Image (cartoon, rainbow, N blue to C red):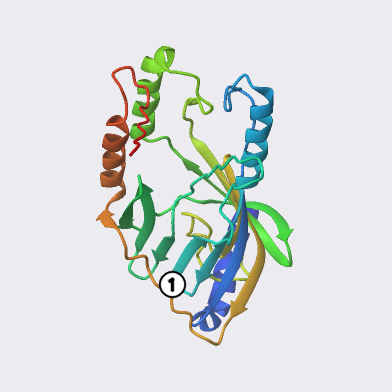
């Protein structure tokens, strides 16, 4: 307990000393993401075709790694995927796979607002809500990430009612489902581990995460890991960050409801997803 209290005390002192510096503090952090891919517990079911399974696994490994940037100043941040010239997942095998992690994520700590881009069947949405207040538990573990000394923090994400309902629907219909490469596993609470540095005195982080005493350089929610491999700081020039502005504005609850309606409209009476193709 003494160590934790000492850490909190040092955090307050450090941030106080750096308050003047942080007024116009800005920068850009580059993150590499990696999605956990394991062929167990039915997470990825075999198609029965060895050659196809190998091609599928290879392409999945490629698209599971992406590069993101986090542009930030003292109060605002914008997290987005770095654009590539070549289509994601395109290869000589002729197979194309795309894994979506959502669009841009904007946060404004001054007005306590967050705006996340999402998409349903090519229709754009802006999920606008109050800034989430994460219940972080500061730990005494430390490590270095690059040149930065980092502290550990942990939070728990409880499974939502929507996740429970979706899984119950899946259980009711699973005996009628056709072969699926991605069967649904029972949703569980997520333990999220973060590593942040007091050397960069902003409360931002990758993805939807924020609210720690320093910049989050690494985060792992059990499924996806974001690891920072480069930070460029600028304490002189002011960085202007533009919030996403294209799309239908909804709250997260409204978006979840609309998404469920869209998905349900694609299912037959047995819960199977119906794919329709059209020819001229």
187 to 176, vertically: above or below: below
Indicate the position of residue 52 as horizontal and vertical percent values: 64, 28
Outermost bottom residue? 236
Residue appearing at x 61%, y 41% in the figure: 94
Apparent side of residue 252 relative to residue 141 in the rendered image (left or right): left
Residue appearing at x 34%, y 21% in the figure: 271
Indicate the position of residue 209 as horizontal and vertical percent values: 49, 55
Outermost front residue? 280
Residue appearing at x 26%, y 35% in the figure: 261
Q: Nearer the viewer, residue 23 or 48?
A: 48
* Residue under pointer 1: 75
Apparent side of residue 172 relative to residue 145 in the rendered image (left or right): left
47 to 254, vertically: above or below: above
Locate the C terminus by quadrant.
Answer: top left
Q: Nearer the viewer, residue 12 or 162?
A: 162
Q: Secondary structure at mark 1?
A: loop
Would residue 195 be visible to someone looking at this image?
A: no
């Amino acid at each position: 307990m003494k160590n934790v209290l000492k850490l909190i005390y040092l955090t307050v002192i450090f941030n106080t000393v750096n308050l003047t510096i942080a007024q116009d503090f800005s920068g850009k952090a580059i993150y590499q993401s990696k999605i956990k891919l394991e062929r167990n517990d039915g997470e990825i079911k075999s198609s029965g075709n060895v050659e196809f399974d190998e091609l599928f696994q290879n392409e999945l490994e490629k698209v599971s790694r992406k590069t993101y940037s986090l542009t930030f100043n003292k109060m605002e941040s914008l997290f987005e995927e770095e654009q590539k010239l070549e289509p994601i997942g395109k290869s000589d095998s002729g197979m194309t796979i795309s894994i979506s992690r959502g669009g841009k994520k904007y946060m404004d700590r001054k007005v306590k607002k967050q705006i996340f881009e999402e998409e349903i069947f090519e229709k754009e949405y802006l999920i606008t809500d109050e800034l989430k207040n994460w219940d972080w538990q500061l730990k005494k573990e430390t490590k270095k990430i690059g040149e930065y000394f980092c502290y550990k923090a942990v939070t728990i994400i409880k499974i939502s009612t929507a996740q429970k309902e979706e899984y119950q629907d899946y259980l009711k219909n699973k005996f009628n489902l056709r072969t699926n490469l991605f069967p649904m596993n029972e949703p569980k609470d997520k333990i999220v581990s973060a590593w942040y540095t007091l050397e960069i005195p902003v409360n931002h982080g990758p993805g939807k995460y924020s609210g720690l005493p320093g910049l989050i350089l690494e985060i792992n929610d059990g499924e996806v890991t974001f690891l920072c491999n480069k930070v460029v700081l600028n304490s002189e020039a002011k960085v202007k960050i533009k919030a996403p502005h294209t799309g239908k504005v909804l709250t997260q609850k409204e978006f979840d409801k609309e998404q469920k309606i869209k998905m349900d409209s694609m299912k037959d009476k047995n819960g199977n997803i119906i794919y329709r193709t059209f020819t001229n």
